[in-house]
Image: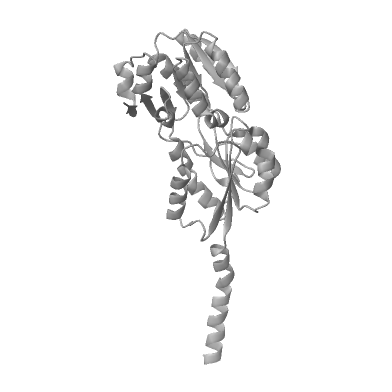
Amino acid sequence: MRRREFFAIVGGAVLATWPAMGQQDRIRVIGMLTPFSKQVENFLDPFLSRMKTLGWEEGRNFRLNFLWAEGENKSLPALVEELLASHPAVIVAAGDPAITAVQRGAARVPIVGITDDMAGSRLIASMPRPGGNTTGISILASELDVKRLELLHALVPRAERIGILADPSTISTRAALDEAAAGLHLQLVSLNATDRGGVERALDALASAGVDAVNVLASPILFAHHHLMIERLNGAGLPAIFQWPERAAAGALAGYGPSFVRTFSQLTPIVDKVLRGAKPADIPVEQPTKFELAINLKTAKTLGLTIPPSILARADEVIE
């Protein structure tokens, strides 16, 4: 083979790889949309750290465009438009309203979502084959809302009237809760809230409704206002259980479910697959694999409660 032919072949091979190399190294935009406020605990560091182990480093081959709805669903459509202006390769969205807003505004942009019941809310076709442009993590809302009611009954055995604080913009678990309450001989008093004003009104109503304890149901909006709820419920002497175990460290009596931070970290391999070309329609929706019970004994003492030893033995974390 002549020298000129050799270099022509080698040079052609190198040039042929350049588009692929450029495709791999170009900056991708990951959009992230949550109804939370910036005051929630930092889940971005674990997310970014795990992304780095998968080959994605912020500033080198991707840029994160993170928008917060600050506990107001009405701002979501405008935030979606803002995200789309940055031409994201994928959008990470939390909660039914955020995922729905992205689906309506971006039919072709891949969505990796985290929500209470992705199939039950009809955000996907099915768990194993989501179809469309959405996949992610579904948190088993119905089962966990009922489990929290059972745990609250065990934590506060004297309680007969249980307040239910719900967000009607998410999937309803009321039928399952009514069935469980009947078996436990409990009376439920249900109130709804979809924004901060609604949360404040619901808290006022619960404080005057004669309830003995409160089950705060799964909801990104209620999560966004958890500091307000914990302060007001504790001040009213009402024991409460929340969706995430981290809420106990924030001062709630108890929290039960998957770890909030770990669940967001669980999203990263799914985001990685999408960035590498996989279609959300073909990526099965995942579920959390570990559920934790956290109890705050300091709050229990303030509320005048003695936690049964059998429940303390079941707790994954006990905050003294």
At 45% from the left edge and 19% from the top edge, which residue is drawn?
Answer: 234
**72 sits to left or right of 235:** right
Determine which quarter of the picture holds residue 169: top right
In the rendered image, residue 318, in percent from the top left (x then y), is placed at: 33, 27
In the rendered image, residue 59, in percent from the top left (x then y), is placed at: 52, 59
At 57% from the left edge and 76% from the top edge, which residue is drawn?
Answer: 15
* Residue 254 showing in the rendered view: yes
Looking at the picture, tell me which residue is in the foreground, 91 or 278: 91
At 47% from the left edge and 50% from the top edge, which residue is drawn?
Answer: 48
Q: Coloured how?
A: one colour
In the rendered image, residue 198, in percent from the top left (x then y), is placed at: 62, 23
Q: How many marks?
A: 0
Compared to residue 255, the image places residue 187 above or below, namely above
Residue furthest bottom as drawn = 2
In what quadrant of the picture does the C terminus appear?
top left
Compared to residue 230, the image places residue 281 above or below, namely below
Looking at the picture, tell me which residue is in the foreground, 239 or 271: 239
Compared to residue 21, the image places residue 38 above or below, namely above
Determine which quarter of the picture holds residue 184: top left
* Residue 107 showing in the rendered view: no
At 64% from the left edge and 33% from the top edge, which residue is drawn?
Answer: 73
**240 sits to left or right of 111:** left
Looking at the picture, tell me which residue is in the foreground, 256 or 181: 256
